[in-house]
Amino acid sequence: MLQKNVTFLTGNAIQKIKFLYSFSSTCTNPSQSSTSTSKTSEIRRRNNVKGCPNRFEYYVRDQCRSGRIKLNDAVQYFDKLIQTQPMPSIDTFNHLLGSISKLGCYLDVFSLYKKMGLAGIEPDLCTLNTLINCCCHLKNVNSGFGLFGEILKRGLKPDPMTVSTLVKGLCMEGRVMNAVQLFDEMTEKGVQGDVFAYGILINWLCKICETGLALEMHRKMLKTNCEVNVFTYSMIIDSLCKDGLISEAIDIFTEMIGGGVSPDVIVYSSLINGLCSAGRLKEAVSFFDEMVGRGIPADAVTYNSLIHGFCQLDLRKEAIIIFNQMIAQEISPDVVTFTILIDCLCKKGKVGEASKLLGLMVRLGKEPNVFTYNSLIYGFCLSGKLDEAVKIFTSIAIRGGMHNVTTYNMLINGYCKNLMMDDAMRLFREMHHNSLKPTNVTYNTLIGALCQAGKIRTAQNLFKEMKNCGLSPNLCTYSVLLDGLCKNGHIEEALNIFESAKCLELESSIEVLSILIYGLCRAGKLEKARKQLDDLLKKGLVPDAVTYNIMINGLCKKGLVSEANKLLLQMEENGCLPDSISFNTIVQGYLRENEIDKAMQILEQMCNKNFLPNDAVTSMLLNLVLVDEQCRVTVESLPNFSPMALLPTRFDNVKQKEM
């Protein structure tokens, strides 16, 4: 049965294509008719004179205007009209063709038009515009241009409806820039587009993120006699807000008000959403108050924008106030409203409150969507409640919902954080089974966790699989893999991967180069580590304190504290200020090498910069001052530091143990 249906649909599609091709040739010369009907056609033409419509024609027109007409009724009316003498006005036929077109029965329009041609009924501009519209809806705008040629051949003058229809057809096929070009050419030839044509172009230009061109088109419209309306303004304001050009959107809004065009809730909602996304909550609230002051009631979209804005800035209490106000205004919160609040609570680990909100959502008859569930899974994983996250994951399928890639990524991340790698890999394979393609986030999470668990070979295999699947490893991928290899002692493999990548982003990443330097230092390959640091500087890159500290620590562990001290000076010369870790590492190195004087010099520099010794250095100093009087005097003279203040606490602990 299924195979028969498929064959039927395919055959039907072929018939449609053949019909359009045959129609293109027919409409090239519609005044021609078959020789067998030429005599009848001539009689029909003589009878086709304009006169007062008869009662039946009025009835047909009324039925068409009512919008209640059905296809079968329309065809019956057509068959009766075409047999009527004298021949009814073309206007009545246009009513029927227009109504059938509105029903989406575009091919039927062509069939009836063909019958009109055989009966000798000449089309007018309205007829041909209707046919062009049908071509555009059938995504065959080229045939529409053939009909446009027919308009010109018949000596008819295209009107704004002709322009709007062709422009819409091109836009529906994704040829928006061609539509703009057509519009400009038509304007040059004296065929002016109306507000609908401008509206179509502005709408589609905004959809393809050509906001600048949309604004330019709007300016052109203002220079014509077209009556501007809130529709075109709202599209431009919304597009500007989505592009983050909030100030420009406000300027257009001001222009709109100045031009006497009253804003509606859509315009205000776009501005409020844009301002909230930009963190300009005070202005968003001001526009909200202005809207209400104008007597324009807010809708769910407006409230959702405000709630989302407050949640983004972690102002949960204020978001709840807006939520309660929304309910007080008898505006029912939708799935988006609840999901925004649940997501905000989950990101802060407030999964208990989020679960209660979910319960309220269900009681109000709002079915949670995959985004709602994803937020809950994230929240439970963040709170360490992995079992609850798994329950939510399972409930999605039970409720008839579908997991998406983000759902899997959330739970895989939860398993990885708990080093439950078997479960994480099971979900990964399940993604493939359910025809969901893992993303870079999926692979990065798994590779990082596998490295952390010491499963280096599995991580490397997953890295290869990732590339074989057509995904390009990003900076995060290389970072987690190289870090895992270095920490597990596979420094040569890490270097090979780094060298083979030949990626500019990778070679200029301070983070990645720091990982390699750390691995080389850990493996005792200080010369190679120092070379990596020097190469980094030669590229014009500025290492951060973390990179320098890794190298300083590596040198100190090998007893090369003087070299480390030189690097500390070089660090400052290169515009990177040493931090507490830098100084503490060198002080600890000198103390370990029993070079007390040098340690004291660095300690003095450190204290002058208001850095305090860490626990390890403090412990070593305390041991020294107890046995070395000169060291005690030196330490006591240091600014901002007095290790002797810690001595009573230590002595008290010793006394308590003795007692």
Image: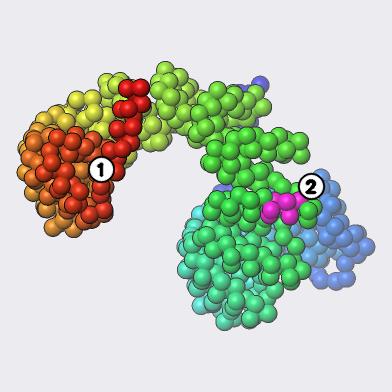
Secondary structure under tag 1 reads helix
Which label lies toward us, 1 or 2?
1
Disc marking residue 71: 2
User: In terms of depth relative to the viewer, which is nearer, 398 or 33?
Assistant: 398
Q: Which residue is mark 1?
A: 644
Is residue 414 highlighted in magenta? no
The quarter in which the C terminus is drawn is top left
Secondary structure under tag 2 reads helix
Q: Position of residue 464 (x, y in %)?
A: 29, 27
CB contact under 8 Å: marks 1 and 2: no
Q: Residues within 10 Å of mark 1 (few under 14, many from 20)?
A: some
Is the residue 578 above or below the residue 615 in the image?
A: below
- In the displayed structure image, the side of residue 433 where residue 143 appears, left or right: right
Q: Position of residue 326 (x, y in %)?
A: 73, 53
Provide the major secondary structure of the magenta segment: helix
Residue drawn at point x = 27 percent, y = 22 percent:
456
- Range shown magenta: 321-327
The answer, for residue 101, to whether it is visible in the render is no
Q: Position of residue 333 (x, y in %)?
A: 72, 47
Residue drawn at point x = 42 percent, y = 28 percent:
417
Amino acid residing under circle 2: Leu
Is residue 324 highlighted in magenta? yes
The quarter in which the N terminus is drawn is top right
Q: Position of residue 91 (x, y in %)?
A: 78, 65
